[in-house]
Amino acid sequence: MNIIKVERAGEPAANPSDSQLLTIDGLEVDYPIPGRRKPFRAVDRISLHVGIGETLGVVGESGSGKTSVGRAVLGLAPVSGGRVTFDGRDISHLSRRARRGLSKDIQVIFQDPYTSLNPLMAVGDILTEPLAAVGGMNASKARTRVADLLEMVGLPRGADRRFPRDFSGGQRQRIAIARALALDPRLIVCDEPVSALDLTTQERILALLIELQERTRVAYLFVSHDLDVVRVISHRTVVMSEGRIIEAGATDSLMQDPQHPSTQKLIMSNPVLDPDEQRERRRRRALLSSPATT
Ligand SMILES: Nc1ncnc2c1ncn2[C@@H]1O[C@H](COP(=O)(O)OP(=O)(O)OP(=O)(O)O)[C@@H](O)[C@H]1O
Ligand SMILES: [Mg+2]
């Protein structure tokens, strides 16, 4: 029994193999450790790709390097080795200026809707900030765009004059989604975007993300520790452990028939509401962790 009841209707907009948008080749992310010569390797030679209009789920236990992959794509974590290519262009080591230019195409939604929005800015200003950053939009066009964005994410028109504190967590995440969509990006890195929300709100936000993808063909690199969430939103999924990809495939087959013991454990450690299934999973998990089967 799935906890989240949202269904994705369609497949990605095009065949990913002939429409790759983001390609990661042998990516390494090293973080310096103060006082030590050798850095800590958080991401260790991983390769993946995301097609136009596709959602790639990145799952794995805490500390496996999921966020570091997303941050490397955004230029927020160091690319110590390998390459990140967006739409055929190497974006592994861009200048700040070039990175700013790329913000039109690549956007982000973070986990915490309470800290990711500037509390001092009215929602209308939060949404026009990205528009102003790339220039070329006058005040009246920007106002129309804000109204369109609010409608797209299901917020009332008057929301632009209010402040983040006036909204619930789910509504704030809608604002963050609207901000990410403002420039019509082609890729959004979503890092645990529904993890801070209650179940019903999770379902609504996931349904919104799916609907927006179907409308705009935006691709998502969707990082989450929650397999139920990834199950509903991702066309394909990669599983990370200790900085590496240990398994990858179409989400449905990966969830139904996981090959790697760590993936099996991850799937079984996801909470389920049905007590019978919970018992069965516990039994199978116990079998998995016994030395004979690992
Ligand atoms: N800025 C940093 N400096 C040093 N080490 C870091 C930094 N960011 C992350 N790490 C380390 O890199 C590893 C991977 O972290 P990352 O945040 O990518 O994992 P994650 O899979 O997103 O985990 P979670 O599910 O808890 O969010 C962890 O061991 C973490 O402590
Ligand atoms: Mg993380």
Image (tube, rainbow, N blue to C red):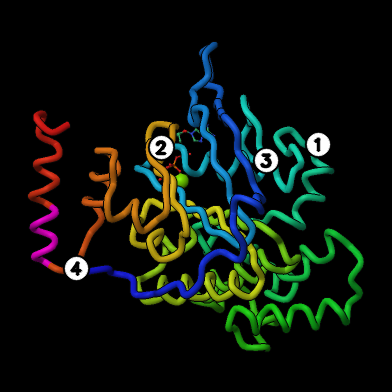
Residue, disc 4: 273
Element type at mark 2? loop
In the image, what residue type sits under mark 3?
Gly
From what the image shows, is residue 106 above or below residue 201?
Answer: above
Q: In the image, residue 5 lies at what x, y percent? A: 34, 75
Magenta segment range? 275-281
Q: Are marks 1 and 4 in contact (CB under 8 Å)?
A: no
Task: List the residue tagged with mark 3.
Answer: 75
x and y percent of residue 78 in the render? 63, 31
Q: How far apart are the two marked residues, 1 and 4, measured between alpha carbons?
A: 48 Å
Q: Amino acid at mark 4?
A: Leu
Amino acid type of the residue that numbered disc 1 sits on in the rendered structure: Ser
Distance between the Cα atoms at labels 3 and 4? 39 Å
Q: Please report whichever mark, 1 or 3, sits nearer to the chain's N-terminal start.
A: 3
The chief SS type of the magenta part is helix
* Left or right: 224 as drawn, with respect to 104: left
Task: For the residues labelled 4 and 2, say whether their Cβ atoms are less than 8 Å apart.
Answer: no
Alpha carbon separation for disc pair 1 and 3: 10 Å
- Residue topped by disc 1: 95
Give the residue number, with chain letter if any, for mark 2. 64
Looking at mark 3, is its residue's CB closer than 8 Å to ligand 1? Answer: no
For residue 49, side relative to residue 194 (left or right): right
How many badges with numbers are in the image?
Answer: 4
User: Which residue occupies 69% across, 78% down?
Assistant: 149
* Label 1: element kind: loop
